[in-house]
Amino acid sequence: MAHRPKRTFRQRPADSSDSDGAEEPSAEPGTRKEQETSGPAEEGPPSGEGLAQVAERPRRVRGARGRGPVWATSRRAPGAAPRAAGAESRTVDLSTDEEDATHHSSESKDDQSSSSDSSSSLEEKEFSSTVKIPDAAFIQAARRKRELARAQGDYISLDVKHPTTISASRNETSEESQEDESQDIWEHQQMKKAVKIIEERDIGIPRSSRSQTVRKFDTSISFSPVNLEIIKKQLNTRLTLLQDTHRSHLREYEKCMQDVKSSQSTIQHLESSSNHTLNYKFYKSMKIYVENVIDCLNEKIISIQEIESSMHALLLKQAMTFMKRRQDELKHESTYLQQLSCKEETSTNGSLAVDEKTQWILEEIESRRTQRRQARVLSGICNHQEGTSSDDELSSAEMTDFQKSQDAIVQNQKKVFEDVHHDFCNIQNILLKFQQWREKFPDSYYEAFISLCIPKLLNPLVRLQLIHWNPLKLDSIDLKQMPWFTSVEEFMEDSKKEDSSDKKILSAVINKTVIPRLTDFVEFIWDPLSTSQTTSLITHCRVILEEHSTYENEVSKSKQDLFKSIVSRMKKAIEDDVFIPLYPKSAIENKTSPHSKFQERQFWSGLKLFSNILLWNGLLPDDTLRELGLVKLLNRYLIIALQNAIPGPDAVKKCKQIAACLPEKWFENSAMRTSIPQLENFIQFLLQSAHKLSRSEFRDEVKEIILILVKIKALNQAESFIEEYHLDHLKSLIKNV
């Protein structure tokens, strides 16, 4: 392995350390004298060749510095003596590094800055001194010589003894070549150190430690003399600046204290007026909420109306089917019996010729009657009269289609508000908003007449809940059990004000929403001949019109419209559906004859309508009921049919049923001795029947007639009849009244 040759360095005016952490040594004592002695001898303009070499040499050195940052620099004292030509170029390079380091440390202390400036100026003077540099041919020859020496041996000895016989220029050239090689080696080492320092910085070496290794205080730097006047002037300037700053801080402090006082007063003012802010926020939020509710309902009301129309059309279609079927069957059966009684169209064998349609209708009628009889036998009903059935049965196919259509409508009803938040479609949540308003700001709540607005706001939501509600069915849900009813009732009960207008909200909702729907049912769907429909309708009407009627002396247009519809519908039923044919006694004496059966069914059907009309007692005015039930139906149809019937127990039974339908309220007056005028025809028929029965074998039926007269308060007529026929055992019936 080759050994590194021992390096010999020419003595330099100032030693520079290759280590980046070494301190800068001070100059040799005799160096300054040698510089002063040799300086004049070297001064003078250099030759053209020397200037070119001098200018070329620094450019090469600077190019070497561009290969990477140099973190270690070599300083020398400002008074150090200049070196030889080769060392001079190195001094130029180091002085350039010194200038860069001085530029980057411009924020350091003033004394260090001045020291760096003085050092740079000295180095510039040294650079400007005249040096003698060999030409390029000589340098190339020296390099070839070194290469030849390397080829012969493993190393080139640095401890070479130059002969003294060589000329000075030849020595300077050799030293220049050696110095050039040493310069290259030194720069290579410095580059390695710079790379190592960068790697150490990347792994987290603090910048402060690096700056400590680079920046060393140079004790050899001399400072400029101290001038007390300048220091005093600087101190006075500094004091003036501090005083101005202090005064500005005082002004800022005073301004801050004023701002604090102003903020405190503003806080107190806002705290005292916070109620107005809260009120404004609440009213604004309530306004936005109501607008959103109204927008939502305006958008959904179209769907609600369509679903209402669909359900109404479905029920109307079913009602019209029953009505048309009953009228067609009545027409065909009546025509058939008339033809049968007159025997106008008979066949050769004596039978009546009937068309296929009439025959099919008669068979359908008899089939449904047979099914109803079987059902009554199974249920244990024995005292049923033919003709009192509603006759509203549907076939299985028709019932399936109806149920399917109804379910589809109910499903559409559930989808109306499925995309709406509960706060905008739930009645309870909506009323809760208004309840908060009523509790927080009752004055503004009542001044805004919210009790008049809530019924209109809830109208679409209540209508949606009433879509599947059928007041004509006995199993229909009660209004009190509906969610909207309970929510409105709770809202009314929570009102602490006794005479609050909120107490009228429920009746207002009923008048504006429920009663109009009832009116539609009465006008188009209700069948007055159906006892079940009439009973269910009356039950709902009593809840609506009695328990939650409007206040006294307050006229409700919707209520009046409902009454008019009820009366109009019953009049129409009397005119269209009551038909009691009159046949010769020879045709009705036989109870099994088709004429007798048909007449019986029609009479009991009329009596059923009579009973359904009088069920409205307490809801409709008495005069209206007497006009409809007694004048138009009893006197015009039922009594005529009774007069045409054969006197006997059947006629008395029918009379007892008529009397049982009469409201007891009409005869509650104890001083009453004569019945109401509308019953005069009925009383006369009873007296005639009693006269006939008293002379027949049915004398026991006379007592039943007397009891009927007593019940309807025809006491004077009953006493006259008893005295006329000397029925003293019946006088007790009158005395007990």
Image: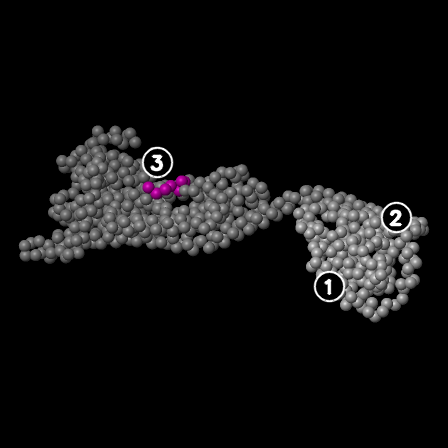
Q: Identify the mark at residue 669; answer none if there is no mark.
A: 3
Q: Position of residue 589 (x, y in %)?
A: 13, 44
Magenta span: 475-481
CA gap, disc 1 and disc 2: 71 Å
Q: Which residue is mark 2?
A: 239
Which residue type carries mark 3? Asn
Q: Residue furthest bottom?
A: 48
The amino acid type of the residue labelled 1 equals: Arg
| Residue 187 visible, this orientation | no
Give the Cα distance between marks 3 and 1: 158 Å
Q: Residue furthest left?
A: 349
Amino acid type, label 2: Leu
Q: Is residue 86 magenta?
A: no
Q: How packed is label 3: few (under 14 Cα within 10 Å), some, or many (20 or more)? A: few
Residue 497 visible in the displayed image: yes
Q: Say whether residue 642 is left or right of residue 439.
A: left
Residue 192, image x, y percentages = 70, 53
Residue shown at 82% from the left, 50% from the top: 24
Question: Residue at 28% across / 45% down in the picture?
Answer: 530
Front residue of 668/217: it is 217
Quarter of the image where one finds residue 440: top right
* 410, above or below 126, in the image: above
